[in-house]
């Protein structure tokens, strides 16, 4: 049995923090100890959804609710409708592709100057010219825009901003060739495919039907870790400009959030947190969760309005002081 146990550890490779859970399941299966009851097992499970009405009426009470009062870790599944209005994001969509940070691709293109010798094409030209030496053929590496990844908090504490964030996400997908959009609350949902529909009202209607955890609780840390646990999703963040649209009001232990932000920061070209709470001039990153993740953030900016968000995203190519440095000056 010890050999079987060691083989199971080698093949399943449970993380150290889940070793007790592994032992409980192993003994239940091989020794008949009964179904294990692992504390927190149900809460830690995060559902992942990959995408392959009437108008919303807000009561006066809802309009007066403040973000922190709505933050919760409880799952609450619901649907969402979006109001029709004029498209004010046309300029943003038009400028986005050229405004994103760029990187040098490994693919090359032909050039007449300032490139490296293309030996294959040059030899082919020599052969076709019967040995004459023509002008050298050159190639250079392409410059391509980096990916844009938006992670949108759709929990109850963000309900007053969700509609604007989704409209921004639709404009980003329409304006950038390599934009990826996810929503998170108590679940993780990829909505990029739905937002590729050109008509915004149809796209948002598809998103409203696809996302299950509108206006529910917040499990920011576990859902971001679930995002990183899927290799295809994690690849979206590699070398990308990642913008998290959330108030970052994590309930309970913020260890999972700190781990997720640290891993995201290691993969991303630039990691930014846009919180609507920063729209208040008195705002300070004073919560334990924000203090823990601030050193790993490149930006902590105001996410309370579409104008502040579009201006920031269009400035991603320009360098800026690190979030911890900037907010240390402010405080």
Image: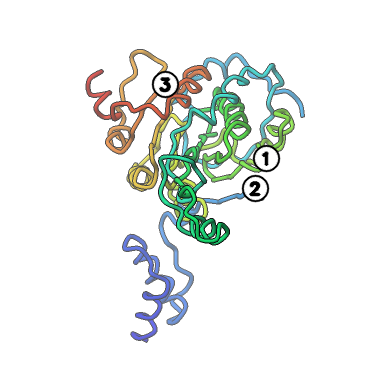
Q: Is residue 109 above or below residue 91?
A: below
Answer left or right for 50 relative to 225: right
Residue where numbered disc 3 is placed: 302
User: Secondary structure under badge 3?
Assistant: strand
Give the SS element for disc 1: helix
The CA span between labels 1 and 2 is 7 Å
Residue 194 image label: 1
**Which comes sooner in the sequence, label 1 or label 2?**
2
In this view, the residue in front, 32 or 287, is 287
Q: Which residue is mark 2?
A: 51
Q: Residues within 10 Å of mark 2 (few under 14, many from 20)?
A: some
Image quadrant holding the C terminus, namely: top left
Please state the horizontal and vertical placement of residue 9, each as a whole percent of the image: 37, 74
Where, quadrant-wise, is the N terminus in this rendering? bottom left
Q: Is residue 242 visible?
A: yes
Local crowd size for mark 3, using a 10 Å CA cut-off: few (<14), some (14–19), many (≥20): many
The structure residue drawn at horizontal position 46% and vertical position 23%, both measured from the top left corner, is 303
If you read the primary sequence from the N terminus, does the residue marked by circle 3 or circle 1 appear first?
A: 1
> What x and y, as percent, mark residue 69?
46, 25
Q: Is residue 118 above or below residue 159?
A: below
Q: Are marks 3 and 1 in contact (CB under 8 Å)?
A: no
Residue drawn at 55 percent across, 34 percent down: 154
**As drawn, is 286 to the left or to the right of 218?**
left
Question: Crowdedness of circle 1 by 10 Å Cα count: few (<14), some, many (20+)?
Answer: many
> CB under 8 Å between callouts 1 and 2?
yes
The residue sitting at 61% across, 21% down in the picture is 89
Distance from Cα at disc 3 to Cα at disc 2: 29 Å
Q: Which residue is at the front of the view, 99 or 287?
A: 99
Looking at the picture, how far across and down is residue 256, in whole percent? Answer: 36, 47
In whole angstroms, how far apart are the C-alphas of marks 3 and 1? 27 Å
Q: Which mark is residue 267?
A: none
């Amino acid at each position: 049995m010890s050999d079987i146990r060691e083989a199971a550890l080698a093949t399943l490779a449970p993380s150290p923090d889940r070793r007790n859970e592994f032992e409980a399941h192993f003994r239940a299966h091989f020794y008949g100890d009964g179904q294990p009851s692992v504390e927190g097992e149900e809460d830690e499970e995060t559902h992942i959804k990959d995408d392959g009405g009437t108008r919303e009426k807000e009561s006066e009470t809802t309009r007066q609710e403040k973000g922190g009062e709505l933050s919760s870790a409880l799952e609450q599944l619901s649907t969402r409708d979006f109001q029709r209005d004029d498209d004010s994001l046309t300029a943003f969509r038009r400028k986005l592709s050229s405004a994103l940070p760029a990187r040098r691709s490994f693919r090359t293109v032909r050039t007449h100057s300032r490139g490296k010798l293309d030996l294959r094409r040059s030899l082919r030209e020599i052969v076709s010219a019967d040995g004459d030496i023509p002008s050298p053929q050159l190639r250079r590496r392409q410059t391509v825009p980096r990916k844009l990844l938006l992670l949108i908090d759709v929990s109850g504490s963000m309900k007053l901003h969700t509609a604007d964030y989704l409209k921004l996400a639709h404009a980003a997908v329409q304006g950038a060739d390599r934009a990826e959009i996810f929503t998170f609350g108590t679940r993780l949902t990829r909505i990029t495919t739905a937002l590729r529909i050109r008509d915004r009202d149809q796209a948002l209607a598809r998103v409203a039907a696809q996302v299950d955890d509108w206006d529910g609780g917040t499990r920011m840390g576990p859902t971001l870790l679930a995002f990183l646990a899927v290799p295809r999703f994690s690849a979206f963040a590699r070398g990308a400009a990642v913008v998290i649209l959330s108030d970052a009001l994590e309930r309970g232990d913020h260890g999972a959030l700190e781990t997720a932000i640290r891993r995201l920061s290691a993969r991303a070209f630039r990691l930014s947190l846009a919180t609507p709470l920063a729209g208040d001039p008195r705002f300070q990153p004073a919560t334990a969760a924000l203090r823990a993740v601030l050193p790993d953030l490149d930006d902590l900016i105001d996410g309370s309005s579409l104008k502040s968000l579009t201006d920031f995203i269009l400035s991603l190519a320009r360098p800026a002081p690190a979030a911890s440095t900037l907010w240390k000056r402010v405080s």
